[in-house]
Image (cartoon, rainbow, N blue to C red):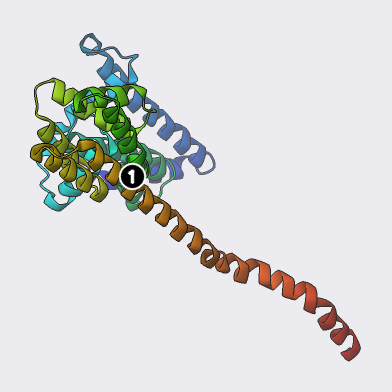
Amino acid sequence: MQENYINQYFSFIHETFPYQSYIFQFVSTSLLIYGIGKIIRNTYKTHSYLYNLEDQSQVYSNWVEALLPFAKKLKLEGYRKKIELSLSRSGWKPEWGIDHFISTQILHFSLAFIILFLILSLLLGMSFFLPLALSLGIGLYPSLNLRTRSDKRVAIINRGLGGFIEYLSLAIAAGLDFQGALNEVCDKYEEGPIKDEFSYVNKNIKLGKSRGEALRELKDRLQLQSMTLFIETLVQSMEQGASVVDTLQSMASNLNLKRFQGAEEEAGKISIKMMIPLVIFILPAVMLVLMGPMILEYVLMSS
């Protein structure tokens, strides 16, 4: 029904102003978009006493909280499990959960659809499904970005875990207990995901959790094979009273060896990967340089 009214309106404009109709349509739709934006902005400013409008992160958080009830109604069990793992691996805000993330996706989709519908459908007269499809892509972008971010963070942790364990073993060998060694390493280690994760473990231990409980929470949060092996071996050695230094040094050696072997495998794959641009780009150019004069001479002689 609404589309019929819009089509009748533009048909009336085309019949009344046959030459200036497109300009009038553009100007009127632009004013309509501007008016809707002003209404939204003024409505939002009426509640400015609740938050500081200049704080963009706070404004964003307010919109996410407003859409939170809609996100909680969406079941999506399989999707929620994947998002939960990616959130725990990516260092997402600890006070925000899966529902908050889905709420951000709803917010991105809603804003994109409103803007694209006004511009593409009303202003340019395109199909309704185009802004809908583009908005769905924009709404799914946060999950793709989160997956990429979590994969990069896990790769950094996996690559630097051996060095962190070796540093920790040296601190314990110097005479510190596990808690003191963990404090020392977290203070002196370079900034990065490994320091953030173990600093969180150190904080939990200071708040009263046992070492095994805090370390196993780290294992469950990352679900990384190398981290799981390290934590289970460390906790078992502490519970059995074995030498922690020997355990840490053995783990560090094994992880560093696996890291070097992985680097050698990646280096070996480079020659295979280089075959694709070699065959597609370089080889045809070389053949053209070598065979070009012969082909040109043959063409001239035959003509």
Residue 39 in view here = no
For mark 1, what is the residue?
A: 141
Q: Residues within 10 Å of mark 1 (few under 14, many from 20)?
A: some
Task: Assign the C terminus to one quadrant of the image.
Answer: bottom right
Q: Residue lying furthest top in this view?
A: 49
Could you say whether the residue bearing mark 1 is in a helix, strand or loop? Answer: helix
Q: Looking at the picture, how far across and down is residue 287, in whole percent?
A: 73, 75
Direction from residue 73 to residue 123 in the image, left or right: right
Direction from residue 241 to residue 290 in the image, left or right: right
Q: Is residue 88 above or below residue 43?
A: below
Residue shown at the point (27%, 19%) measured from the top left: 58
Q: Looking at the picture, how far across and down is residue 217, in whole percent?
A: 14, 37
Q: Looking at the picture, how far across and down is residue 300, in whole percent?
A: 89, 84
Residue 34 in view here = yes
Residue shown at the point (40%, 50%) measured from the top left: 126
Q: Nearer the viewer, residue 284 or 128?
A: 284
Q: Residue lying furthest bottom in this view?
A: 302
**Marker count (numbered):** 1
The part of the image, by quadrant, that contains residue 192 is top left
Q: Is residue 100 above or below residue 46?
A: below
Q: Looking at the picture, how far across and down is residue 221, in whole percent?
A: 19, 40
* Residue type marked 1: Tyr
The part of the image, by quadrant, that contains residue 197 is top left
Direction from residue 54 to residue 225 in the image, left or right: left
The part of the image, by quadrant, that contains residue 245 is top left
Q: Nearer the viewer, residue 205 or 138?
A: 205
